[in-house]
Amino acid sequence: MYFLLACLLSWLVLFPAGRDLLISTLERAGIRWRRRVAEVARRQEQGAAELHRSGRAQLAGMAAYLRRHYALCAAGLALVCVPPMVALLAGSRPALKGFEASTREINPQVAGLLEGEQLVPPPALPPLAFTTAEVELARPMIATASRDWALLDQAYAQRLLLAFRIMKEQHGYDMAILEGYRSPERQNRLAALGTSVTSAAAFQSWHQYGLAADSAFVRDGKLVISEQDPWAMRGYQLYGEVAESLGMTWGGRWKMRDFGHTELRVPGVMKR
């Protein structure tokens, strides 16, 4: 390649005929290029002129149509514009509320659960812990209650486990579940014992949907349910604050207080 290039340069430098041939070739190429450019420009000018004539014709046609049917066009324009204007002027705020920025503080523990953290239920207490006289007096028929975490709604179970963790790590209270899921038949049997036990019949309690649980404290390996115990009452108040901060409803605020009860009210779940 270098040899051929050197020969070409030598031919152009030493032989005038070579230079003339190169110059004439470039001139012919330039003439052809200018002709093509001129042809393209001429076609573009013709296209622009044709488009201009077509546009003027269409505008003239539209103007003629509007003059002939001005009443119909005015009525159509009113139908299109008046309803949005009425809605805009009648509303107090034109913004869509669903897209407003939320000012509610996000609970970091709940945010952790939503990102995929899965808590594990604590070891189950021995069955004898639920058959003591104190427990039976405070919670009738509790020995036969279900304490299976797998029967609870997954979202609610994770919030309840998180409440147990916070009570242990921040306040020093160990907690255990007394009753989780409750069948409709058991709900009716408890309701038959009177309003001191429960005033909800079957499917009137969130227990039937796995979205409620009754819990108590564990001290020295024993369940502490009594509200007469100052230590337990202090724990119930803390438990209510923790549960509500995690989005659950706490029974301690009801007229018939149930300090160990929490539930997660999910719209559309409770049957009417």
Image (spheres, rainbow, N blue to C red):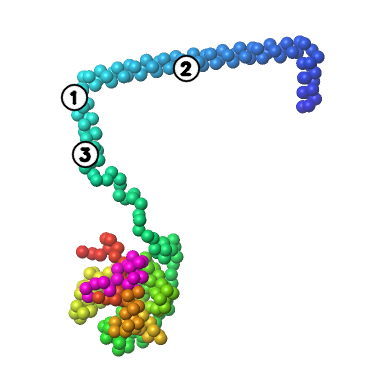
Q: Does dot 2 land on a helix, a strand or a loop? A: helix
Q: Position of residue 146 (x, y in %)?
A: 33, 77
Q: Amino acid at mark 1?
A: Ala
Residue plotted at (34% across, 71% down) = 241
Q: Residues within 10 Å of mark 1 (few under 14, many from 20)?
A: few
Q: Position of residue 100 (x, y in %)?
A: 33, 50
Res. 188 in view:
no
Say if mark 2 contacts mark 1, CB within 8 Å. no
Q: Amino acid at mark 2?
A: Gln
Residue plotted at (39% across, 60% down) = 106
Task: Please tell me in which quadrant of the rendered image residue 81 appears.
Answer: top left
Residue plotted at (25% across, 70% down) = 205
Q: Does dot 3 land on a helix, a strand or a loop? A: helix
Earlier residue among tags 2 and 3: 2
Q: Amino acid at mark 3?
A: Val
Q: Which residues are magenta?
A: 239-256
Horizontally, residue 140 falls left or right of residue 43, namely: left
Residue at numbered disc 2: 44
Q: Of the residues tagged 2 and 1, which is closer to the observer?
A: 1
Horizontally, residue 68 falls left or right of residue 132, namely: left
Q: Is residue 215 magenta?
A: no
Q: Of the residues tagged 2 and 3, which is closer to the observer?
A: 3
Residue at numbered disc 3: 86
Q: Does dot 1 land on a helix, a strand or a loop? A: helix
Q: Which numbered tag is attached to residue 71?
A: 1
